Amino acid sequence: MSIESLSVLQPDASQPDEEQTTAGSYFVSNYPPYSFWTPQQVPSALDALDRAPLPGTPLGVYLHIPFCRKRCHFCYFKVYTDKNAAEIETYLDAAVSELELYTKRAFIGGRKPRFVYFGGGTPSYISSSQLERLVARMKALLPWDEAEEVAFECEPGTLTEGKIKLIRELGVTRLSLGIEHFDETVLQINGRAHGAREIGRAYDFARKMGFPQINIDLIAGMVGDTPEKWRDAVRKTVELAPDSVTIYQMEVPYNTTIFKEMKARNESIAPVAPWRVKREWVEYAWEEFERHGYGLRSAYTAVKDVEKTKFVYTDMLWQGADMIGLGVASFSHVGGVHYQNEHDWDQYLAALQEGRPPIYRALKPTGEERLIREFILQLKRGKLSRRYFEDKFGIDPAARFAEPVGSLAQRGFLSVDADMMRLNREGLLQVDRLLHEFFLPQHKQ
Ligand code: SF4
């Protein structure tokens, strides 16, 4: 696809309803949906913490660092932009005490983490000395010497050469730069804290430090974007030659600044392009990356070396790994049970001061829900092994999901052969919308 043929990113009232970008989110990150997790089911989570792990289940650790310099207008995460150094210290102390609580529970079962993920918010927002102390305390409680991946999210404007050097020395293997776009005006309109000039500087520091994997995040369809600016963003990303590029399609979830402004203006269509146009833009990007030797690893990520470049965090999580999520509003999956931490700052800290796990809501999925969860998450890779599901769940997914599989095949998105199920490019570009077709009826909204 040539850039000249790319549609302009404007809301377009002539598009059918399902193609409009309205408020809400298609993106599927877990199953059953979070709205079905309840405080009444927290005892299931506590029971899971007291059970030994199933043999062979990998363990991961996620730490949510909920601080940012500014709140982006499209952001729906739990983040704070007004906490001072003392409050950040209090929070990090609490997260370490949360980890300490877990290390005494049976579900650890002598395991060491196979992956560690620092997510946000902005993990790179905290100071080098805070980060150094944090990591030393975490490693003393649960050593990472067997971790295949330590991932760390950064906002370019928070990085100095010294901080990047420290992040590498602490053992981070995958550095993810939240660039989102390269255009100064687009970054400003969308409320990003970093400017275009900070990107190259941060990237150069990171390359110099020799991280095994550098990922760049981009968002297709930000407010104010144009075909020329998107082409430029793709070109600049290709020039930087990161190991991995992740592209999300712009959504407008309910608790974002953009949604609040839409509500004030009584508008139902977001000031963002229709889905068809965003898919076209992402397709253009994938074609450009493929032209430069990249291959697709999932619906969102292109990598330079498809055989070697892993993303252990999603690879393991999407196959049912245990993961303890530390920090306010974090998500965990332990012993087949989902749970989420308190999403209120004071309640999160209060629970830990009282020495109890800060769990707000939970859900214990049935066997069928666990099967659907793994199926839809793995379909995000664009292909999955029928044998995997036969071995693990004793079913053939082509038979279990005959109706949606048939429907997707008929519409030309999916093919099934003796071993594999595969989404084609068009299916992959709208995978999150299609995944809802595999939900149980009570979970379809
Ligand atoms: S940097 Fe990320 S977490 Fe922070 S406000 Fe922006 S989108 Fe949200």
Image (spheres, rainbow, N blue to C red):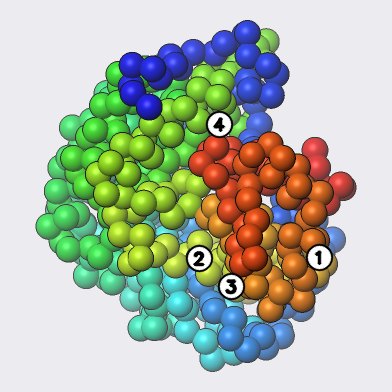
Q: Is residue 393 above or below residue 286?
A: below
Residue 321: give its label: 3
SS class of the residue under badge 1? helix
Which residue is drawn at the image coordinates 43% and 28% (left, top)? 281
Secondary element type, mark 4: loop
Which residue carries the number 2 mark? 315
Marks 1 and 3 in Cβ contact (< 8 Å): no
Q: Residue furthest bottom?
A: 110
Disc 1/disc 3 C-alpha distance (Å): 17 Å
Residue 131: give x, y in percent of width and height.
32, 63
- In this rendering, the answer to whether 381 lies above or below 116 is above
Q: Position of residue 379 (x, y in %)?
A: 60, 55
Residue 368 circle label = 1
For badge 2, the amino acid type reads Asp
**Type of amino acid at the residue the image marks with label 1:** Glu
Front-lying residue, 71 or 245 = 245
Residue furthest out toward the front:
418
User: Callout 3: 10 Å neighbours few (<14), some, many (20+)?
Assistant: many
The reply to whether discs 2 and 3 touch (Cβ–Cβ < 8 Å) is no
Which of the marked residues, 1 or 3, is nearer the chain's N terminus?
Answer: 3
Tell me the residue that label 4 is attached to: 251
